[in-house]
Amino acid sequence: MELYKLTLASILSRKTFAIFAFLILTLPFALPMMTPWESKPSLLEPARAQMAWMLLWTAAIGWLLFQGATIGDRWASHGILEYFKTLGVSRWRQMGQLWLSCFTVFAGMMVITFIISTFTAMPGDAVEARHWLVTNLQYVLLFLLVIAPLLALSIALGTRFNGAAAYAVTIGIALYGLFGIGYLEVFLADNDNPVLNVLYLVSPHYHLSDLTSRLVFKLGAIEAAELTRIAAYLGGLALLTVGVSYQFFREGK
Amino acid sequence: MNASDPAILLPQGLRIGYRSRFRKTTPETVLATTETPIELGNGRHLLLARNGRGKTTLLKTIAGIIPSLTGKISCRGIVQFVDEDLRFDGELKPRQIFSALFKNGQRAFAMEMAERIELDIEKPYGKLSKGNRQKVGLIVAEARTRHNGPQVLLLDEPFSGLDFAARDKVDQIWSEHAEGIVRLVCVHPDEPTLKADSAIAIREGKLEQIEVHNGTLDWLETRTSLN
């Protein structure tokens, strides 16, 4: 786990994570207070949860994927990965250790988000509270199924190309999967275009993992069968992404 | 040579160089070949050649980073390749690097070696001079050899940027820890301060072993023969 420790030390010494951690810790409380919440105080808590999860998505796309892309780029360009290769550390293990080092720091942000969203915004009613907790847990699961493989992809692309290109590609895929598909869906509702239909089918439907509106509007937890279907779809996509990432990953440039 | 001793074996007919991974019809670029087998055992061996003749390619081929064109190199021992361009993050201090990479005895050795070769372990890597960065790579390589088992250490121009005093101290440390380690050290022929048990040279595309008498090379002769 030396590559893990070296990369973790590098991330911690750069300290950029602290900015996002600070924002995640403070903005869910501060920003809802800047709205005219006095007119309907019951909206304050769902707004806090919404803000917490939105900030986590922002940190994932703005910080985590960037870390992965630049670390992959730096370590491959600086000969670190080739050095570990000569020590017998395989590509899988190298990719895994880089992934884990980035995720170790990000896990802290996830925990903060989960605590804020669950315990500072939980409804008073016992049934609603149970649903709230389960929805947050489901959100964590689906969020992980999207972000974890994208991190592996950003690392792998960083090792092969460069940090900027790797980040641009990964952020593009993430934003398209989260928001772009929504526009495509609207377009397809009015136009029957076979090419776009195929594109829609093969697109990564990451928006399925975004349960923010479910929390805000208190729609309750996703039913088990539905959750299994979504998790299986995102899990399959995750396996595919990790497989592609492995093919792109290389130790030297 | 004992079967448990570290060794590098370059077979007869070994060819090192590059071939295109995508265009199979592109001819190979052969940098060097062996006409007789070369066996490097315990001790310090120099790798000599002029620029672009395949020194780093040979080290990378031995380390398994790139494949040989023909022939199979065998290594007995834990292989480490420390590239001349090995760089750590600029924000990391050498102390943090050693703490991340080593524990216990190896870490203690790294700290002790840093003191001996006068490396400031509290200064960020990005602010170290070229020579001091080279010291970090050398320490990483040496500290890792501090455990049981045979070791094969491949060092690509480890002394570039190091002053004479640091070279002498590294030389001394190598002499103190010579057992169970093959050190193949790539150097320019104009670095006359190193001792060696043997040397291999790349001359006119051929990998050849050069005799070394009394642990020192005839530098002038070597330089002339490489031209």
Image (tube, rainbow, N blue to C red):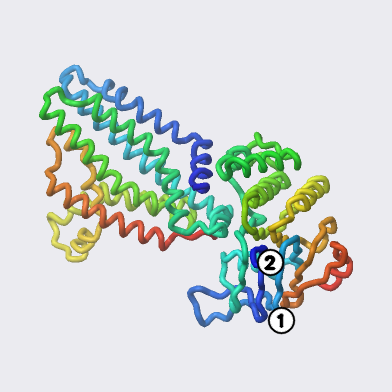
Q: Camera-side residue: B89 or B181?
A: B181
Q: Are marks 1 and 2 in contact (CB under 8 Å)?
A: no
In the orientation shown, which residue stands out farthest toward the top? A38
Residue B110 position, x and y percent, is 66, 43
Instruction: Tell me: A112 left or right of A208.
Output: right
Residue B153 position, x and y percent, is 66, 58
Quadrant of the image occupied by residue B211: bottom right
Q: Which residue type carries mark 2?
A: Asn
Label 1 vs label 2: CA separation?
A: 25 Å
Q: Is residue A163 above or below residue B67?
A: above
Which structural element holds mark 2? loop
**Is the residue marked by circle 2 packed among few (<14), some (14-19), or many (20+) residues within 10 Å?**
few
Q: Is residue B19 above or below residue A99?
A: below
**Residue bearing the label numbered 2:** B2
Instruction: Tell me: B81 left or right of A4.
Output: right
Identify the subunit bearing mark 1.
B
**Residue bearing the label numbered 1:** B35
Of mark 1 and mark 2, the one earlier in the sequence is 2
Q: Which residue type carries mark 1?
A: Glu
Instruction: Tell me: A90 left or right of B115.
Output: left
What label does residue A181 carry, if any? none
What residue appears at the point 70 percent right and 71 percent down from the top-left corner? Answer: B39
**Is the residue marked by circle 1 packed among few (<14), some (14-19), or many (20+) residues within 10 Å?**
some
What residue appears at the point 51 percent right and 48 percent down from the top-left corner? Answer: A3
Q: Is residue A120 above or below residue A16?
A: above
Residue A116 position, x and y percent, is 28, 28
Q: Is residue B41 above or below residue A152?
A: below
Q: Camera-side residue: B26 or A142?
A: A142
Label 1 or label 2, whichever lies nearer to me, is: 2
